[in-house]
Every structure is written in C-alpha cells, then in structure tokens.
Amino acid sequence: MSATCVDRLLSELCVDLGFCLPPDDWTRLLDSPPSTIDGFTDEVVLAEGMDPLVYPKLRRQVREVVAKHFSLSL
C-alpha cells in the first residue's frame, strides 16, 4: 500500500472513528504499513493504546475501513 493510500486511510479513521494516531505512529505506518488487513487494524488499535481483543466492536469498525482501503489500493 502506498504512503498516499495509508495517509488517506489514517485520515478517514481519524475523522470518522476518532482514531487520530500520534505523529510517530502515523509516520511509522506511512513508512512501513502492515501488509494484511488484520495486521494493519491491530496496529492502529494498539497505537491508540487499546487491546484489540478487549474492544472487538471498535476493532471491527476499524477493520471495515481498513479493508475498504486495502481493496481500493489493489
């Protein structure tokens, strides 16, 4: 996934779901995005200081956005 696609994805997560990552985490994901939908989803949730297993509903919402962007980048 290109840095532009990751930037759009992270922007949507911030605006729509309130997952506005700290700058260091944002940059890390831009530079080296996880290659799977689940991996990317978990990285975002963890960067927000949450355990993906404790917040399954939020994780599912984040995953839906991530999956949409992964399909757009193919």
Image (spheres, rainbow, N blue to C red):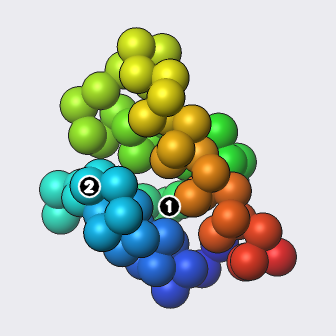
Q: Position of residue 41 (x, y in %)?
A: 53, 43
- Within 10 angstroms of label 1, few (less than 14), some, or many (20 or more) residues? few
Q: Position of residue 19 (x, y in %)?
A: 29, 52
The first of marks 2 and 1 along the sequence is 2
For the point 43% across and 35% down, which residue is it? 58
The kind of secondary structure element at disc 2 is: loop
Q: Which amino acid does label 2 sit on?
A: Gly
Residue ID for mark 2: 18
Q: Where is residue 10 in the image (x, y as percent from the top left)?
A: 40, 67
Q: Quadrant of the N terminus?
A: bottom right
Viewer-closest of 19 and 31 = 19
What whole-number distance in Å separates the C-alpha atoms at marks 2 and 1?
22 Å
State whether residue 27 appears in this view: no
Classify residue 48 by image quadrant: top left
Q: Do the residues labelled 2 and 1 touch (CB within 8 Å)?
A: no
The kind of secondary structure element at disc 1 is: loop
Q: Position of residue 71 (x, y in %)?
A: 78, 69
Residue ID for mark 1: 32
* Residue 73: numbered disc: none
Reply above or below: 66 against 44.
below
